[in-house]
Amino acid sequence: MTIRPVTIRPASAAAIGEAAAILGDGGLVAFPTETVYGLGADGRNEQAVASIFAAKNRPQFNPLIVHVKATDTAAVYADFDDRAHALAARYWPGPLTLVLPRHTDSALSLLVSAGLETVALRVPAHPTAQALLSTFDGPIAAPSANASGAVSPTRAEHVAQSLGGAPDLIVDGGPCPIGLESTVIDLSGDTPRILRHGAVTLEALRREFGPVDDAGTPGETAAPVKSPGMLARHYATSLPLRLEASSADPDEALLAFGEPVPPGAAKIENLSPAGDLTEAAANLFAMLRALDLPQYSAIAVVPIPDRGLGRAINDRLRRAALPP
Ligand code: TXA
Ligand code: MG
């Protein structure tokens, strides 16, 4: 087996042009978004989309998000009702993914929907993602650019660590400002349902749009979860995670939040000394990686408030802590 070299280029106009050409040829490009890095392919090219699943070792039943330039492009691929238009007007471009009924005559690959009658669409706000969508001038299917089940990448080097040379090109746009994946909301039923908590909070959605079901928190809904990738262990570190820790053992690494920091750990990262959830979200995945070293026995994690962005942070931590 030949090992492919890793190619990382800063996000210049030339690199974006090269990335768009690779997508057009059916290749894979990792690129920054405001949430996490994505592993992109032409969303209309079945073969290219299949190679995303292969590169990530992702189960084929777990559908992908399709990134588009703007709402009018999204409406080419899915049914937009009034609720979808209102959410898109409020949050796009930005960290919200809409799950909508797929047009039956859609040019999109069938694999992106993994057999469902819906498609997940998002307009990213990151300037590099926007530039790539403009230059490529087509839909980009892109899950997070990490091996399936592992910690999501918030820097170009995380992509290289997780996927090696599987992407033909990694476009480096610096650290992702939000650091947690988009909120996924399902609009295919009567009441909107959050399938994954993210940067757009449940509180904000309920305040601005009325009733929203929470299917993103295990136990909060009786309805079966339609998003097949959601229940499994995910975002997993190599070390076990010990949540709700009030103290740390001398052989443990500690992920802290706010002050004071429980004493005794071998190594400490503090998500936000000031107790700010936005700062904590941006630091979460990079700090988990920094603590995930073989000389420690576990990563102890202090309690994080379960409100606003804290819900999305706790969701990632709980899934990461599930036994393998
Ligand atoms: O912030 C993000 O959303 C990042 C960046 C790259 O855009 N992408 C991302 O993709 O997190 P991924 O594949 O790691 O997560 C997509 C989530 C999965 O939980 C998947 O099951 C769900 O969205 N999903 C995708 N299509 C769906 C559909 N048609 N119905 C229900 N859930 C869907
Ligand atoms: Mg992911």
Image (tube, rainbow, N blue to C red):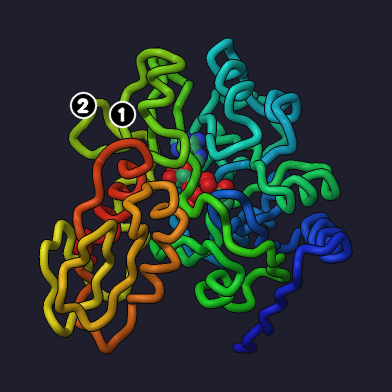
Residue 177, position in %: x, y? 56, 53
Q: CA distance from mark 2 to mark 1?
A: 10 Å
- Secondary structure beneath dot 2 equals loop
- Whether residue 183 is visible, yes or no, is yes
Q: Which dot, 2 or 1, sits closer to the camera?
A: 1
- Quarter of the figure with residue 6: bottom right
Taking the spot 17% from the left edge, 65% from the top edge, the residue there is: 242
Taking the spot 47% from the left edge, 55% from the top edge, the residue there is: 282
Q: Nearer the viewer, residue 216 or 289?
A: 289
> What mark, if any, has residue 185 been given in the picture?
none
Taking the spot 46% from the left edge, 40% from the top edge, the residue there is: 199
Amino acid type for the residue under numbered disc 2: Ala
- Whether residue 143 is visible, yes or no, is no
Q: Which quadrant, please, contains the N terminus?
A: bottom right
Look at mark 2 in the image and give the residue it sits on.
222
Look at mark 1 in the image and give the residue it sits on.
214
Q: Does 251 sit above or below residue 287?
A: below
